[in-house]
Amino acid sequence: DTGVSQDPRHKITKRGQNVTFRCDPISEHNRLYWYRQTLGQGPEFLTYFQNEAQLEKSRLLSDRFSAERPKGSFSTLEIQRTEQGDSAMYLCASSFGVGEGDIQYFGAGTRLSVL
Amino acid sequence: TQLLEQSPQFLSIQEGENLTVYCNSSSVFSSLQWYRQEPGEGPVLLVTVVTGGEVKKLKRLTFQFGDARKDSSLHITAAQPGDTGLYLCADPFLKYIFGTGTRLKVLA
């Protein structure tokens, strides 16, 4: 078990470009979460998958953001027409849960810088 | 919407000192988790507290859950440079609402 991995670790892009991040969860985990974290703040929930179904999306997830988890394995988070305000750390977490309150395991994140 | 406020926001102390950080909620917690996040890494779970008044110890770290389950504290005894990081509290039952964090720096 190699833990949750995220790729890339760092991404620098110009405003208006599209970016895509990948998250590979722990293999037996059915749940996958995306968070955004700005410097010095706690993570903010973006969206959540149970297997391949996207069950919840935060208000923070504007229509420029889309997330997928085909086949219930890895997940991608795409940001279209990036803005400088999108600069942040994007964290992925996975868990094995059947109810509420499961333990999440986080990846190291993808740091996005929009110039 | 539940808000989790942590204090202090920043803390810089010398190695060997003791410290306490706090997490307060506007609502009753169902349970509460404490995480530590080191620079460039994701948060790592330290402990989950469930019962009001519960105290858990993890080596030099002591976690206490308030009787009314609206607050929690984390006490570190004899802090070491390896304790440096961002300490976060979270409510796992509300889509993982995280606190604002306490950034701790322990100087050698």
Image: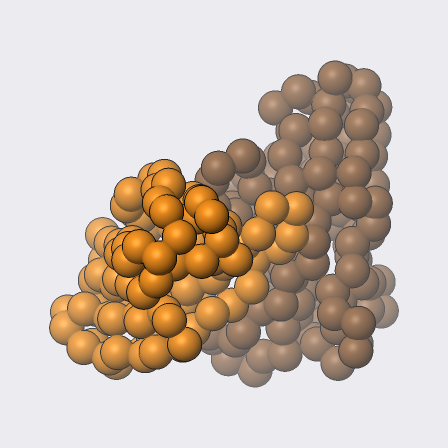
In the rendered image, residue A81, in percent from the top left (x then y), is placed at 77, 24
Which residue occupies 74% across, 17% down?
A: A115
Which residue occupies 35% across, 57% down?
A: B16
* Residue B66 placement: quadrant: bottom left
Which residue occupies 54% across, 54% down?
A: B37
Determine the colour of chain B: orange
In the image, the chain rendered in brown is A
Residue nearer the viewer, A6 or B38: B38
Q: Is residue A63 left or right of residue B6?
A: right
Residue nearer the viewer, A56 or A41: A41
In the rendered image, residue B14, in percent from the top left (x then y), is placed at 37, 47
Q: Is residue A94 visible?
A: yes
Which residue occupies 51% across, 68% down?
A: B45
Q: Is residue A101 left or right of residue A32?
A: left
* Residue B44 placement: quadrant: bottom right
* Residue A114 placement: quadrant: top right
Q: Is residue A9 left or right of residue B8?
A: right
In the rendered image, residue A45, in percent from the top left (x then y), is placed at 54, 50
Q: Is residue B9 above or below residue A97?
A: above
State the colouring used for the structure image. Answer: by chain
In the rendered image, residue A78, in percent from the top left (x then y), is placed at 78, 41
- Figure label count: 0
